[in-house]
Amino acid sequence: MSTTSYPISAYVETLGVRYFARMLSKIRLHATGSLHPDFVENMGGGLDLRLCDFLRVDYAELATQTLATTSDEEVLNWAFGQGRELNETDKLLWNHYVTKLGWRDQVSESLANRKLSSGLQDRDDIMTMIEYFEYDEGRKS
């Protein structure tokens, strides 16, 4: 019997960047065959793609680098060298974006649909995608 896992929280920061550790967690879990199947289809898309675009790195190259090391910081430093390094303002902008995604924006409808499919449609306190991840993946109740 195989065990599947959810990636770590999107709130976890790597060198001040939220969501990066979650993306790497998905890559590593998928490589071992233990990533929850709900995540496989959209790997490299959604927020993974947006963060890679923000860093100006290719997702496939980042995935290869991720599997070559166990250090999230090392992978992010590699990304800084391949794409662009983020200054404190860049990190602030990214972190604000990722923590507010789904709140009165182009992703609000998708968030509502996900809440409905998870039986969380009555949870008005879940207002962003990463809040939704926390509840849907069982870190909050």
Image (spheres, rainbow, N blue to C red):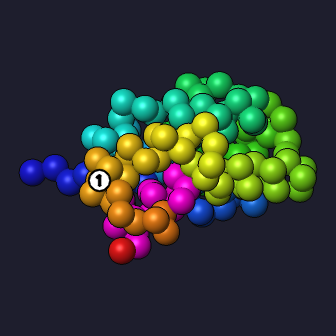
Indicate yes or no whether the magenta region holds residue 39. no
Magenta span:
127-140
Q: Residue furthest bottom?
A: 141
Residue at 85% across / 42% down in the picture? 85
- The quarter holding residue 47 reads top right
Q: Residue furthest left?
A: 1
Q: Is residue 120 left or right of residue 75?
A: left
- The quarter holding residue 55 reads top right
Indicate yes or no whether the magenta region holds residue 138. yes
Instruction: Name the spot of residue 112 as percent of width and height, x first.
Output: 43, 48
Instruction: Name the spot of residue 34 as percent of width and height, x first.
Output: 29, 47
Specify the amino acid type for callout 1. Ser
> Is residue 52 visible from the viewing direction of this image?
yes
Q: Is residue 104 left or right of residue 8?
A: right
Residue at 36% across / 63% down in the picture? 122
Instruction: Name the spot of residue 119 as percent of width and height, x first.
Output: 27, 57
For disc 1, the marked residue is: 118
Q: Is residue 137 left or right of residue 76?
A: left
Residue at 55% across / 56% down in the picture? 128
> Is residue 5 visible from the viewing direction of this image?
no
